[in-house]
Amino acid sequence: MRLETRTIRKGKFKSGLRPVLAGLAFFLIIACASGSDVVGRWREIGKSATLEFRRDGTFEAVDNQGMAVRGKYALDEKGNMRVEITHQGSPPEVVKGKVTVRGDELTFEYSDHNDVERYRREK
């Protein structure tokens, strides 16, 4: 009788765990999909600034005056991006905004002001 009770409990546990695992897998797929859209090299449309986002959450950028910066980025499933720019000898600068990727065009809308930057994917 005890053996049967354990079998039933074990079965209930496994069947209750499946929806949780399926939900976790779905979340990871969505998170990876939105993050992978930005991965690559981008050039600001009509300008010389470039961005390069890597899969490991790091980036490098060169602005229109030729100044290079690097740091880390995080992107959630809603397109909210947090960029942490590393400056030698001083604390990191944090920039937040909304990223949208449509085809080969990336749009970054800053959270703290109304500026919008548009980039085209470099191949």
Image (cartoon, grey):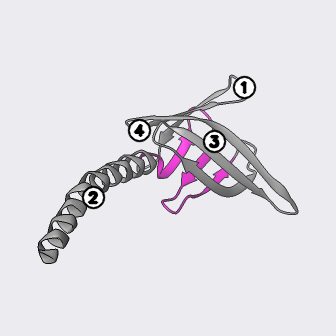
Where residue 90 appears, x then y in whole percent? Answer: 87, 58
Residue at label 4? Answer: 104
**Which amino acid type is marked by label 1?**
His
3D distance between C-alphas at marks 3 and 2: 51 Å
Q: Indicate which label's residue lies in the foreground, 3 or 1.
A: 1
Residue at label 3? Answer: 48
Highlighted range, magenta: 37-62
Q: Which disc number belongs to residue 113?
A: 1
3D distance between C-alphas at marks 2 and 1: 44 Å
Q: Earlier in the sequence, mark 2 or mark 4?
A: 2
Q: In the rendered structure, are the residues bearing label 2 and label 1 in contact, judged by CB atoms less than 8 Å apart? A: no
- Please indicate whether residue 46 sits to the left or right of residue 114 in the image: left
Q: Earlier in the sequence, mark 1 or mark 4?
A: 4
SS at badge 4? loop
Q: Residues within 10 Å of mark 1 (few under 14, many from 20)?
A: few
Where residue 96 appears, x then y in whole percent? Answer: 66, 39
**Which amino acid type is marked by label 3?**
Ser
Residue at label 2? Answer: 17
Q: Quadrant of residue 4?
A: bottom left
Q: Indicate which label's residue lies in the foreground, 3 or 2.
A: 2
